[in-house]
Image (tube, grey):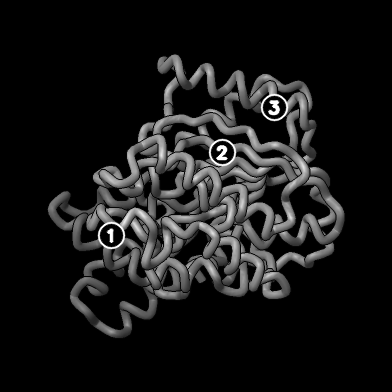
Amino acid sequence: MAAEFLSSPTAGPCPDAESTTLALPRLLAGQAQAEAAAAHLAPRLFAQAADTDVMDAFPTQDHELILPKLFHLTYSQPLFSTYPVRSNTFIASLGSTLVVAPHPDDEALGCGELLALLRQVGQPVATALASDGTMSHPASQLFPPSARRAVREAEFRHALTILGVENTEPLLLGLPDSQVPATISDASFTEAVAQLRAFLDDQQPATVLVPWRRDPHPDHRATSYWLQAALAAMPHPPRRLEYVVWAWERVTPADLPNVADKVSGFRLDVRAVAAQKQQAIAAHHSQVAPGIFTDDEDGFLLSEKMLEHITGPYEVFFAALAP
């Protein structure tokens, strides 16, 4: 039910907010009947809690009890499981596509199967890589930053080849991993926007793929910000689709779409190219066990849980609602 509401962000305010508010004390007391009633209204109420005065009906000290309860009721179903599934005939309509990845591997994790399907139907795909990827294993002595960057760029190119994306030279911005600029006051932000804008002008994509604007990683959010800045100056910007990566594992209520975002969520059935995606992820040898930068014991590797989410039968995207 929660995902259904979130995939329909045009839904209006909850008409039964008052009755739900009255039911919440009984919900918190654990009465089964009240819990069942609240479960019906929890998604809408929870989505509005940050923007309305519904929570003001309760003492401030109770909010930390109420919100987790509503969150549990709202998101007890598998994340995104009730988003509509679009037909794969939709893929050809995307036209030439540019994928913007914050790190080497995000292109495979977030939308690798869509990239493979685009290439299957003959659509050109260009790529832009934001960061140098060096901070996954910052303590490695055997692989200093320049070596880590070289390894990760090589993995990025190899993964793209597996996905069938090998016709154009990627734009490698080389921004510092974990410090991708997120504000216009940062000189490197302005430079990144200018480089991406020039690449957009050169490639003329019909569609741009970028991380979901609140994907729970600062570099992913920053990448979304400066892509938006690059698109804003275009008289006829391409369609924008936002893919999820860390939302599969680290999502909080504030990370998910709300009415103000003016987007709808959908899924693509990507089982036909699942093997390609798995191979592309595996091509990032430094990020999957046992890894390459093994002298950094605290370095990052993709967890089995994360890989289980990422390699499921669907990829999830958000698209702007029609005006």
Please provide percent x and percent y for residue 52.
38, 45
Residue drawn at x 59%, y 67% is 279
Which element is circle 3 on? Answer: helix
Quadrant (top left/top right/bottom left/bottom right) for the C terminus: top right
* Within-10-Å neighbours for mark 2: few <14, some 14–19, many 20+: many
Residue drawn at x 63%, y 26% is 196
Residue type highlighted by circle 1 = Leu
Q: Which of marks 2 and 1 is nearer the N terminus?
A: 1
Q: In this view, does 74 lie to the left or right of 15?
A: left
- Could one spot residue 7 in this view of the protein? yes
- As drawn, the label of residue 199 is 3
Q: Mark 1 or 3, which is nearer the eye?
A: 3
| Residue lying at the far bottom of the rendered structure | 32
Q: In this view, does 230 lie above or below 135?
A: above
Q: Is residue 24 above or below residue 32?
A: above
Which element is circle 2 on? Answer: strand
Q: In this view, does 156 lie above or below 307?
A: above
Residue type highlighted by circle 3 = Phe
Q: Which of marks 1 and 3 is nearer the N terminus?
A: 1
Q: Between marks 2 and 1, how big is the CA–CA gap?
A: 37 Å
* Within-10-Å neighbours for mark 3: few <14, some 14–19, many 20+: some
Please provide percent x and percent y for residue 217.
39, 46
Question: Which residue lies under the disc numbered 1?
Answer: 67
Residue type highlighted by circle 2 = Leu
Q: In which image quadrant can residue 58 be found?
A: bottom left
Q: Between marks 2 and 3, how big is the CA–CA gap?
A: 12 Å
Q: Which of marks 2 and 3 is nearer the N terminus?
A: 2
Question: Which residue lies under the disc numbered 2?
Answer: 129
Q: In this view, does 309 lie to the left or right of 278?
A: left
Q: In which image quadrant can residue 214 be found?
A: top left
Q: In this view, does 54 lie to the left or right of 41?
A: left
